[in-house]
Amino acid sequence: ASGKNVKDMGAYKFWQTQPVPQFGEEGKKLEEGPLKIQTVEEIDKEPQPLVAGFDWVTVDLTDDGEMKEVYELLNGHYVEDDEAMFRFNYIPEVLRWAMMAPGWQRKYHIGVRATESRKLVAFISAVPVNIRVRNKTFTTSEVNFLCVHKKLRGKRLAPVLIKEVTRISNLDGVWQGLYTAGVVLPRPVSTCRYYHRALNWPKLHGCGFSPLPAGSKPQYQVRKYAVPDGTATKGLRPMRETDVDAVVSLLTRYLARFDMAPEFTAEEAKHWFLPKKDVKQVIWSYVVEDNNKNITDFFSFFCVESSIIKNNEVLRVAYLFYYATEAGLTTTPDKPALKARLNALIHDALVLAKKAKLDVFNALSLMDNGLFLEQQKFGGGDGQLHYYLFNYRANPIAGGVNAKNQL
Ligand code: NHW
């Protein structure tokens, strides 16, 4: 991801005006909570005017034509790696899953069109998410897919889009935001590192994603990353709609172990974890059912493609999503048992992802991932993911760093 990596607040002309924790106050233990309190009456009823030649629109993602416009904007202009070798390719099925989650409203699919050509040139979106930070739970707008056409970069359009999604949220009585980015902004609540586990090493090598380590040979790498044909965990099966309540219960108890986590309703769990009848599958979720028909374990991963810019092919990338296991919930947490169980589950996740023809499996240094990343042959990547809260001061959440140190 591009952007500056400086921690000088003066450099952040826009962000220094926003209710976010600023650099320079780290280290002190602060009282957690909103930074700025306002009422709906104080919020502008109209958006800020755009420069001449551009109009605000809301995008109708239920319309295939408008969905295609968002897809094409992102496909050509969304996030790239530092060397511009790969760019996210969020297909409509993924965009629908991500932006039409329970509670979605069309007014949060905010676009900018060129007045004359009607071309969509910028976009930002949000969905409501209930998030718990330590012992407080609040509603946030989770902002994603901020994108400005490459020809309009550097013209301060991003701050205008961010202010617009803030205004729309505020008019709905939502005062907090949640977002992640590869760039450093004031000020991350947590920072994670990306880890990658090759599934299709020859393809990853061919496109420049995985170098051949010095002294190794391609066939050694292929052997290193080979996975068995079948899964090994007894009772493992795809999650079904009838599992939703059991999964929510298990996941809620498991996520209570962490300082920051979303809270899932049954409706949200259904949306986020159960595959839709789409042309292309986006989400894979599995449970382990024991002899007494109890759900003891759960894991999920989703796929987002990346375009390989040089040859227009795509990499099919799996991202580890939520997981939970009873092995992490014993009153005296037994680390060896948790470690063994997670390794077994993630090993099976790799088998299933390979079967689904995914090329690489990504995970972050968060939750309990430090217990399996090394053993499952994940390697640390260049990318970092910073987590941000808008209008909420929180002491840093160490999850990412701890997980990394456990390796
Ligand atoms: S992160 C992915 C963001 N998108 C991309 O990287 C796509 C490729 N890049 C672009 O399209 C996931 C443009 O470069 C963008 C910036 C649009 C990024 N987040 O218009 P200007 C998300 O979608 C600041 C926040 O001239 P530009 C999450 C930058 O620091 N701010 O730049 C999005 C500078 O401010 P400063 C970012 O290159 C969360 C200003 O933008 C940013 O033409 C949004 C420059 O603007 C980023 N990723 O366009 C926040 N990248 O203070 C939501 C740059 O330094 C907040 N900037 O002068 C919560 C709101 C909801 C609250 C509810 C109560």
Image (tube, rainbow, N blue to C red):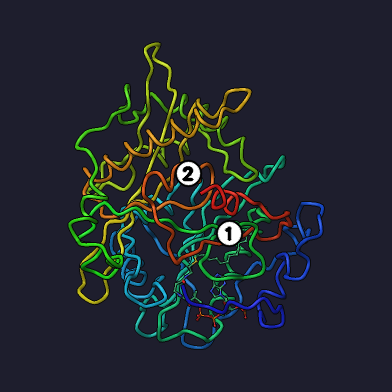
73 with respect to 15 (left or right): left
Q: Is residue 285 above or below residue 394?
A: above
Disc 1 residue lies near ligand 1 with CB under 8 A: no
| Residue that lies at the very extreme toward the top in this rendered image | 292
**How far across and down, in percent of the image, does residue 204 sit?**
25, 62
Q: Residue at x 71, y 75 (%)?
A: 16
The quadrant where residue 255 appears: top right
Secondary structure at numbered mark 2: loop
* Crowding near the residue tagged with mark 2, few <14, some 14–19, many ≥20 C-alpha atoms within 10 Å: some
Examine the rendered structure and indicate whether residue 104 appears above or below residue 165. above
Residue wearing tag 2: 102
Q: Is residue 190 left or right of residue 247?
A: right
Q: Residue furthest front?
A: 215
Kind of residue at disc 1:
Thr
User: Can you give x and y, in whole percent of width and height, for residue 256 in the image?
Assistant: 61, 35
Q: Which residue is mark 1?
A: 191
Mark 2 or mark 1: which is in front? 1
